[in-house]
Image (cartoon, rainbow, N blue to C red):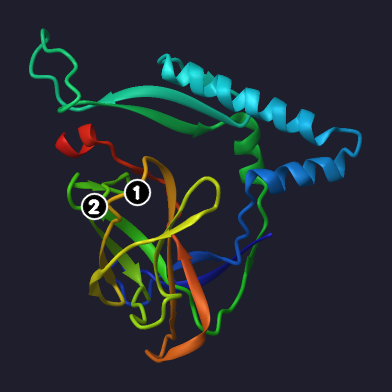
Amino acid sequence: MLQFSLQENLLTAAPNDMMAQPVNVRTYNLQEIIRRILARNPGLGTSQLNASLEEFFEEVCIITDDGGAVNTPLFNTQPSISGVFDSATDNFDPKRHRVKTNLMLGTRLRKATTGIKVQKVQTADPAPFVLEVHDILSNTTNELLTPGGVVQLRGGRLKLVPDNPANGIFLIDEQMQAFKLGLSIENKPARLIAMLPADLRQGTFTLEVRTTLSASGKEGKTLKTGRFMKELTVAGQADVEN
C-alpha cells in the first residue's frame, strides 16, 4: 500500500492546487530482498542465491560496458550519446559528448506498478519535498553531481536547523551509506544551496533532505525526511568539462 499526503503545488500558479507526496515509503536494500526471498523459499541457500545475483549483476555490467542493451522482465537498458556533433565528419569527443545508459521499466515491473494500491493519509507536520536538483558546475538538472561543486535544491519545507547535526542534505549510495553535504550557502524553505564533498566517489546516489523544522517554523523533536525520487550520478571529469 502506497501512502500519500497532499501538499501545495509550487509548479502551478493556482493557489489551491495540490500535489501528491508519497510518505512512509520503506526502502529495501539487496540483503533485505535476499532475506525476503529466503523466507519465501526456505530451500534456497543464502550463498548460492548471493552468488547467482552477483553473476547476474556482473554480466549486465559487462554487456553495458561493451555498449550493449539489456532486455529483462524487470528493466530494459539502452545506450545513447548526448552532445552536439558539428558535422557529419565530426568524431566523439569526451569533452563535448557523453555516453549514457537509459533505464526503462520491463514488462513485469511495469505490470507491478499498475497494481499499486494507494491510501491518502493526513500528516500533522508534512515532510520536506524536493522538486529539482541543479548541479552548478556541470549546469545539469536532475542528472549529475560534481565533487567539490555546488548543488541547488528547489522544493518545499526544505529549511534546515543549522545547529542540529541531524539536519542536512544527504546522499545515499547503493549500499545505503549516507554522506552529508557540506556548508549550506543558502537555507530557505523553497531553496537550499550547498557544497558537494570534494572526495565524493563516482556512482549513483539518492538525495534526501532531513530537517527537524516544523511547519510553524519552530524546531521540533521529529526528524522529517524528504527524498528526491530520481537517482543522481556523480560526474567524472569529462562530464564537468563538457
Q: Position of residue 65 (x, y in %)?
A: 42, 19
Q: Which type of secondary structure does the marked residue at label 1 adopt?
A: loop
Q: Position of residue 140 (x, y in %)?
A: 23, 45
Q: CA distance from mark 2 to mark 1?
A: 8 Å
To which quarter of the image does residue 213 belong?
Answer: bottom left
Q: Which type of secondary structure does the marked residue at label 2 adopt?
A: loop
Q: Residue at x 19, y 28 (%)?
A: 83
Q: Nearer the viewer, residue 229 or 11?
A: 229
Compared with residue 81, is residue 7 higher up or lower down, i.e. above or below? below
Compared with residue 190, is residue 206 higher up or lower down, i.e. above or below? above
Neighbourhood count class around disc 2 (C-alpha, 10 Å): few under 14, some 14–19, many 20 upward: some
Is there any visible trace of residue 71 in the rendered image? Answer: no
Residue 15's tag is none
Whether residue 69 sits left or right of residue 122 in the image: it is left
Q: Are marks 2 and 1 in contact (CB under 8 Å)?
A: yes
Residue 148's tag is 2
| Quadrant of the snapshot with the C terminus | top left
Q: Nearer the viewer, residue 180 or 239?
A: 180
Residue 200's tag is 1
Residue type, label 1? Leu
Is there any visible trace of residue 37 in the rendered image? Answer: yes
Q: Residue at x 61, y 32 (%)?
A: 74
Residue type, label 2? Gly
Q: Nearer the viewer, residue 124 or 139?
A: 139
Q: Nearer the viewer, residue 192 or 156?
A: 192
Q: Residue at x 49, y 33 (%)?
A: 104
